[in-house]
Image (cartoon, rainbow, N blue to C red):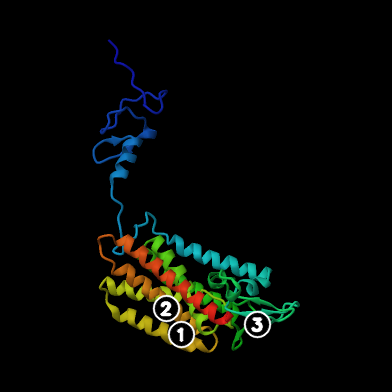
Protein backbone atom coordinates (compact mmCIF):
# COMPACT_ATOMS: atom_id res chain seq x y z
CA UNK A 1 0.00 0.00 0.00
CA UNK A 2 1.54 3.33 -1.11
CA UNK A 3 1.75 6.38 1.18
CA UNK A 4 -0.34 9.38 0.27
CA UNK A 5 1.56 12.06 -1.63
CA UNK A 6 1.86 15.33 0.34
CA UNK A 7 2.38 18.71 -1.28
CA UNK A 8 3.28 22.19 -0.11
CA UNK A 9 0.23 24.11 1.11
CA UNK A 10 1.35 27.19 -0.86
CA UNK A 11 2.72 25.37 -3.90
CA UNK A 12 0.46 22.33 -4.57
CA UNK A 13 2.62 21.16 -7.47
CA UNK A 14 5.64 20.67 -5.19
CA UNK A 15 5.82 17.28 -3.50
CA UNK A 16 7.25 17.43 0.02
CA UNK A 17 7.33 15.51 3.27
CA UNK A 18 8.54 18.32 5.58
CA UNK A 19 5.95 20.04 7.75
CA UNK A 20 5.93 23.22 9.84
CA UNK A 21 6.70 22.32 13.46
CA UNK A 22 4.17 24.91 14.61
CA UNK A 23 1.07 24.39 12.45
CA UNK A 24 2.09 21.04 10.85
CA UNK A 25 1.29 22.17 7.32
CA UNK A 26 3.57 20.72 4.65
CA UNK A 27 6.08 23.18 3.21
CA UNK A 28 8.52 23.21 0.31
CA UNK A 29 12.09 24.62 0.54
CA UNK A 30 10.89 28.04 -0.70
CA UNK A 31 8.43 28.25 2.21
CA UNK A 32 10.75 26.92 4.93
CA UNK A 33 12.08 29.28 7.57
CA UNK A 34 14.72 28.10 10.02
CA UNK A 35 13.45 27.80 13.61
CA UNK A 36 14.97 26.74 16.92
CA UNK A 37 13.50 23.31 16.29
CA UNK A 38 12.77 22.24 12.71
CA UNK A 39 11.22 24.70 10.27
CA UNK A 40 8.31 27.15 10.30
CA UNK A 41 6.08 28.22 7.43
CA UNK A 42 5.84 31.81 6.21
CA UNK A 43 2.55 32.52 7.99
CA UNK A 44 3.78 31.22 11.35
CA UNK A 45 6.94 33.33 11.12
CA UNK A 46 4.87 36.43 10.28
CA UNK A 47 2.50 35.75 13.16
CA UNK A 48 5.42 35.30 15.54
CA UNK A 49 6.93 38.63 14.50
CA UNK A 50 3.66 40.41 15.30
CA UNK A 51 3.73 39.10 18.85
CA UNK A 52 7.33 40.21 19.47
CA UNK A 53 7.51 43.58 21.18
CA UNK A 54 9.63 46.05 19.22
CA UNK A 55 12.83 47.13 20.93
CA UNK A 56 12.96 50.72 22.16
CA UNK A 57 15.79 53.08 23.02
CA UNK A 58 16.11 54.73 26.42
CA UNK A 59 14.28 57.72 24.95
CA UNK A 60 11.35 55.69 23.63
CA UNK A 61 12.32 55.59 19.97
CA UNK A 62 11.94 52.40 17.97
CA UNK A 63 15.24 50.65 17.33
CA UNK A 64 15.69 50.56 13.57
CA UNK A 65 16.25 47.15 12.00
CA UNK A 66 18.97 48.69 9.90
CA UNK A 67 21.99 50.54 11.31
CA UNK A 68 21.81 53.01 8.41
CA UNK A 69 20.96 56.55 9.70
CA UNK A 70 18.27 56.96 7.06
CA UNK A 71 16.86 60.32 8.20
CA UNK A 72 20.32 61.88 8.47
CA UNK A 73 21.16 60.80 4.93
CA UNK A 74 17.81 62.07 3.63
CA UNK A 75 18.34 65.46 5.28
CA UNK A 76 21.84 65.69 3.85
CA UNK A 77 20.54 64.72 0.42
CA UNK A 78 17.81 67.34 0.58
CA UNK A 79 20.26 70.08 1.55
CA UNK A 80 22.61 69.12 -1.27
CA UNK A 81 19.80 68.95 -3.84
CA UNK A 82 18.58 72.39 -2.80
CA UNK A 83 22.12 73.73 -3.11
CA UNK A 84 22.35 72.37 -6.65
CA UNK A 85 19.02 74.05 -7.39
CA UNK A 86 20.53 77.33 -6.17
CA UNK A 87 23.35 76.98 -8.68
CA UNK A 88 20.87 76.54 -11.54
CA UNK A 89 18.28 79.05 -10.29
CA UNK A 90 20.05 81.75 -8.23
CA UNK A 91 16.78 83.51 -7.40
CA UNK A 92 15.83 80.56 -5.16
CA UNK A 93 17.88 82.13 -2.36
CA UNK A 94 16.04 85.45 -2.44
CA UNK A 95 12.67 83.74 -2.75
CA UNK A 96 13.03 81.24 0.09
CA UNK A 97 15.72 82.57 2.45
CA UNK A 98 14.76 83.41 6.01
CA UNK A 99 13.75 87.07 5.96
CA UNK A 100 11.59 88.70 8.58
CA UNK A 101 10.67 91.88 6.72
CA UNK A 102 11.87 93.73 3.65
CA UNK A 103 10.81 95.83 0.69
CA UNK A 104 11.15 94.75 -2.94
CA UNK A 105 11.29 97.22 -5.83
CA UNK A 106 9.85 96.40 -9.28
CA UNK A 107 13.39 95.80 -10.60
CA UNK A 108 14.02 93.19 -7.91
CA UNK A 109 16.15 95.39 -5.67
CA UNK A 110 15.73 94.90 -1.93
CA UNK A 111 15.39 97.68 0.62
CA UNK A 112 15.15 97.97 4.39
CA UNK A 113 11.61 97.43 5.66
CA UNK A 114 9.60 100.33 7.00
CA UNK A 115 6.01 100.14 8.14
CA UNK A 116 3.59 101.87 5.83
CA UNK A 117 2.61 101.90 2.18
CA UNK A 118 5.21 102.74 -0.46
CA UNK A 119 3.97 103.00 -4.01
CA UNK A 120 5.77 100.58 -6.31
CA UNK A 121 7.31 98.59 -3.45
CA UNK A 122 6.11 95.23 -2.14
CA UNK A 123 6.49 94.05 1.42
CA UNK A 124 8.19 90.65 1.56
CA UNK A 125 9.15 88.26 4.31
CA UNK A 126 7.46 86.58 7.25
CA UNK A 127 5.75 89.85 8.15
CA UNK A 128 3.85 89.60 4.85
CA UNK A 129 2.66 86.05 5.52
CA UNK A 130 5.61 84.20 3.99
CA UNK A 131 5.88 81.88 6.98
CA UNK A 132 7.44 79.13 4.89
CA UNK A 133 10.71 81.10 5.04
CA UNK A 134 11.06 80.04 8.68
CA UNK A 135 11.84 76.52 7.47
CA UNK A 136 12.95 76.84 3.85
CA UNK A 137 15.82 79.10 4.85
CA UNK A 138 17.25 76.22 6.89
CA UNK A 139 17.73 74.14 3.73
CA UNK A 140 19.48 76.88 1.75
CA UNK A 141 23.16 77.85 1.88
CA UNK A 142 25.30 80.68 0.62
CA UNK A 143 26.04 80.37 -3.12
CA UNK A 144 29.70 79.90 -4.12
CA UNK A 145 30.14 83.61 -4.81
CA UNK A 146 28.05 84.71 -1.84
CA UNK A 147 30.92 85.52 0.52
CA UNK A 148 34.58 84.81 1.13
CA UNK A 149 36.57 83.79 4.18
CA UNK A 150 40.04 85.02 3.37
CA UNK A 151 40.97 83.53 -0.02
CA UNK A 152 38.36 80.78 0.29
CA UNK A 153 34.78 80.94 -1.03
CA UNK A 154 32.75 80.73 2.18
CA UNK A 155 29.64 79.87 0.17
CA UNK A 156 31.05 76.40 -0.52
CA UNK A 157 32.54 75.99 2.96
CA UNK A 158 29.16 76.92 4.43
CA UNK A 159 27.38 73.82 3.18
CA UNK A 160 30.47 71.60 3.58
CA UNK A 161 30.83 72.48 7.28
CA UNK A 162 27.13 72.05 7.96
CA UNK A 163 26.85 68.71 6.18
CA UNK A 164 29.97 67.41 7.92
CA UNK A 165 28.52 68.37 11.31
CA UNK A 166 25.13 66.91 10.38
CA UNK A 167 26.77 63.63 9.36
CA UNK A 168 28.78 63.35 12.59
CA UNK A 169 26.10 64.45 15.05
CA UNK A 170 23.05 63.19 13.22
CA UNK A 171 24.09 59.54 13.15
CA UNK A 172 24.58 59.42 16.92
CA UNK A 173 21.45 61.35 17.84
CA UNK A 174 19.23 59.48 15.36
CA UNK A 175 20.36 56.12 16.73
CA UNK A 176 19.46 57.13 20.30
CA UNK A 177 16.21 59.00 19.69
CA UNK A 178 14.73 56.98 16.84
CA UNK A 179 13.82 58.37 13.45
CA UNK A 180 10.53 60.14 14.24
CA UNK A 181 11.80 61.94 17.35
CA UNK A 182 15.04 62.83 15.60
CA UNK A 183 13.23 64.38 12.64
CA UNK A 184 10.98 66.40 14.97
CA UNK A 185 14.06 67.61 16.84
CA UNK A 186 15.78 68.69 13.63
CA UNK A 187 12.80 70.61 12.25
CA UNK A 188 11.98 72.29 15.57
CA UNK A 189 15.63 73.33 16.00
CA UNK A 190 15.66 74.80 12.50
CA UNK A 191 12.41 76.62 13.26
CA UNK A 192 13.68 77.85 16.63
CA UNK A 193 16.77 79.31 15.00
CA UNK A 194 14.67 81.19 12.43
CA UNK A 195 12.28 82.48 15.08
CA UNK A 196 15.12 84.00 17.12
CA UNK A 197 16.44 85.63 13.94
CA UNK A 198 12.96 87.06 13.36
CA UNK A 199 12.75 88.39 16.92
CA UNK A 200 16.21 90.00 17.07
CA UNK A 201 17.26 90.67 13.46
CA UNK A 202 14.08 90.67 11.35
CA UNK A 203 15.64 92.71 8.56
CA UNK A 204 18.55 90.35 7.95
CA UNK A 205 18.30 87.64 5.32
CA UNK A 206 19.78 84.37 6.55
CA UNK A 207 20.29 80.87 5.15
CA UNK A 208 21.83 77.66 6.40
CA UNK A 209 21.25 74.47 8.36
CA UNK A 210 23.38 75.80 11.23
CA UNK A 211 20.40 76.35 13.55
CA UNK A 212 19.34 72.72 13.18
CA UNK A 213 22.95 71.54 13.55
CA UNK A 214 23.38 73.49 16.79
CA UNK A 215 20.15 71.88 17.96
CA UNK A 216 21.73 68.48 17.30
CA UNK A 217 24.79 69.60 19.27
CA UNK A 218 22.59 70.37 22.28
CA UNK A 219 20.83 67.02 21.82
CA UNK A 220 24.19 65.22 21.71
CA UNK A 221 25.09 66.74 25.08
CA UNK A 222 21.75 65.91 26.74
CA UNK A 223 21.71 62.36 25.35
CA UNK A 224 25.17 61.56 26.70
CA UNK A 225 24.39 63.10 30.07
CA UNK A 226 21.13 61.15 30.34
CA UNK A 227 22.92 57.89 29.51
CA UNK A 228 25.50 58.54 32.23
CA UNK A 229 28.48 58.49 29.91
CA UNK A 230 31.90 60.02 30.57
CA UNK A 231 31.28 63.72 29.98
CA UNK A 232 34.89 64.91 29.65
CA UNK A 233 35.08 64.36 25.90
CA UNK A 234 31.50 65.59 25.45
CA UNK A 235 32.24 68.77 27.45
CA UNK A 236 35.30 69.45 25.30
CA UNK A 237 33.20 69.00 22.19
CA UNK A 238 30.51 71.39 23.46
CA UNK A 239 33.13 73.96 24.48
CA UNK A 240 34.51 73.91 20.94
CA UNK A 241 30.99 74.12 19.58
CA UNK A 242 30.21 77.22 21.65
CA UNK A 243 33.56 78.84 20.85
CA UNK A 244 32.82 78.34 17.15
CA UNK A 245 29.43 80.02 17.66
CA UNK A 246 31.18 83.06 19.17
CA UNK A 247 33.88 83.22 16.47
CA UNK A 248 31.42 82.78 13.61
CA UNK A 249 29.15 85.51 14.99
CA UNK A 250 31.20 87.99 12.97
CA UNK A 251 30.15 86.53 9.63
CA UNK A 252 27.13 84.29 10.32
CA UNK A 253 23.80 84.60 12.11
CA UNK A 254 24.55 84.00 15.79
CA UNK A 255 20.83 84.42 16.44
CA UNK A 256 20.06 81.36 14.31
CA UNK A 257 22.78 79.35 16.06
CA UNK A 258 21.62 80.30 19.54
CA UNK A 259 17.96 79.76 18.71
CA UNK A 260 18.67 76.28 17.35
CA UNK A 261 20.87 75.41 20.34
CA UNK A 262 18.21 76.43 22.88
CA UNK A 263 15.37 74.76 21.00
CA UNK A 264 17.30 71.52 20.52
CA UNK A 265 18.20 71.46 24.20
CA UNK A 266 14.58 71.97 25.29
CA UNK A 267 13.25 69.27 22.96
CA UNK A 268 15.86 66.71 24.01
CA UNK A 269 15.36 67.39 27.73
CA UNK A 270 11.65 66.70 27.18
CA UNK A 271 12.57 63.46 25.41
CA UNK A 272 15.13 62.36 27.99
CA UNK A 273 13.24 63.06 31.20
CA UNK A 274 9.67 62.25 30.23
CA UNK A 275 8.12 59.73 32.67
CA UNK A 276 8.13 56.11 31.53
CA UNK A 277 4.36 55.93 31.87
CA UNK A 278 2.82 57.71 28.88
CA UNK A 279 6.27 58.73 27.70
CA UNK A 280 5.41 59.07 24.01
CA UNK A 281 2.36 61.21 24.76
CA UNK A 282 4.37 63.51 27.05
CA UNK A 283 7.13 63.88 24.47
CA UNK A 284 4.67 64.63 21.67
CA UNK A 285 2.79 67.13 23.85
CA UNK A 286 6.06 68.89 24.74
CA UNK A 287 6.90 69.31 21.06
CA UNK A 288 3.41 70.62 20.31
CA UNK A 289 3.58 73.13 23.18
CA UNK A 290 7.02 74.33 22.04
CA UNK A 291 5.75 74.69 18.48
CA UNK A 292 2.78 76.72 19.76
CA UNK A 293 5.13 79.01 21.70
CA UNK A 294 7.28 79.59 18.61
CA UNK A 295 4.19 80.36 16.53
CA UNK A 296 2.93 82.77 19.18
CA UNK A 297 6.27 84.59 19.19
CA UNK A 298 6.11 84.97 15.42
CA UNK A 299 2.56 86.32 15.62
CA UNK A 300 3.51 88.87 18.30
CA UNK A 301 6.59 90.01 16.39
CA UNK A 302 4.60 90.33 13.18
CA UNK A 303 2.03 92.45 15.00
CA UNK A 304 4.78 94.69 16.38
CA UNK A 305 6.41 95.14 12.97
CA UNK A 306 3.19 95.83 11.12
CA UNK A 307 1.89 98.20 13.75
Residues at marks 1 and 2 touching, judged by CB atoms closer than 8 Å:
yes
Left or right side of 173 for 89: right
Report the disc number at residue 245.
1
The answer to whether one can see residue 165 in this image is no
Q: Position of residue 112 (x, y in %)?
A: 64, 85
| Mark 1 or mark 3: whose residue is earlier in sequence | 3
Please indicate whether residue 209 sits to the left or right of residue 107 in the image.
left
Q: Secondary structure at mark 3?
A: loop
Left or right: residue 252 compared with residue 105 = left
Residue 16 at x, y percent in the picture:
34, 25
Q: CA distance from mark 1 to mark 2?
A: 10 Å
Which numbered marker is on residue 116?
3
Q: CA distance from mark 1 to mark 3?
A: 36 Å
Task: Specify the quadrant of the image occupied by residue 17.
Answer: top left
Which one is earlier in the sequence, the residue at label 2 or at label 3?
A: 3
Element on which disc 1 rests: helix
Rendered-image quadrant of the C terminus:
bottom right
If you read the primary sequence from the N terminus, does the residue marked by circle 1 or circle 2 appear first?
1
Position above or below: 72 against 213: above
Q: For the residues carrying marks 1 and 3, which lies nearer the camera in this image?
A: 3
Location of the N terminus by quadrant is top left
Residues 183 and 55: in front is 183
How far from the left and from the top, in percent, is residue 77? 53, 64
Q: In this view of the protein, can residue 104 be seen by the observer?
A: yes
Q: Give the residue pinned by disc 2.
A: 261
Q: Residue 237: where, in percent of width, then height?
A: 37, 81
Q: In the image, which disc is placed on residue 307?
A: none
Q: Residues within 10 Å of mark 3 (few under 14, many from 20)?
A: few
Which tag is nearer the camera, tag 2 or tag 3? 3
Amino acid sequence: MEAAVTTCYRHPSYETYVSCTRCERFICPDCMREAAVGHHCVECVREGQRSVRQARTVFGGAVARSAVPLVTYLLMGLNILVYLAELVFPDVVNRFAMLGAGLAAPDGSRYLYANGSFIGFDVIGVVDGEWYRLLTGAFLHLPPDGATLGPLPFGVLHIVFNMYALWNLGRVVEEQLGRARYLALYLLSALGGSVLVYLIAPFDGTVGASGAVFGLGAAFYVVNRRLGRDMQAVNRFMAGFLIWMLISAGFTSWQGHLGGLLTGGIVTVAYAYAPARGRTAVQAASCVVLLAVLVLLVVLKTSALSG
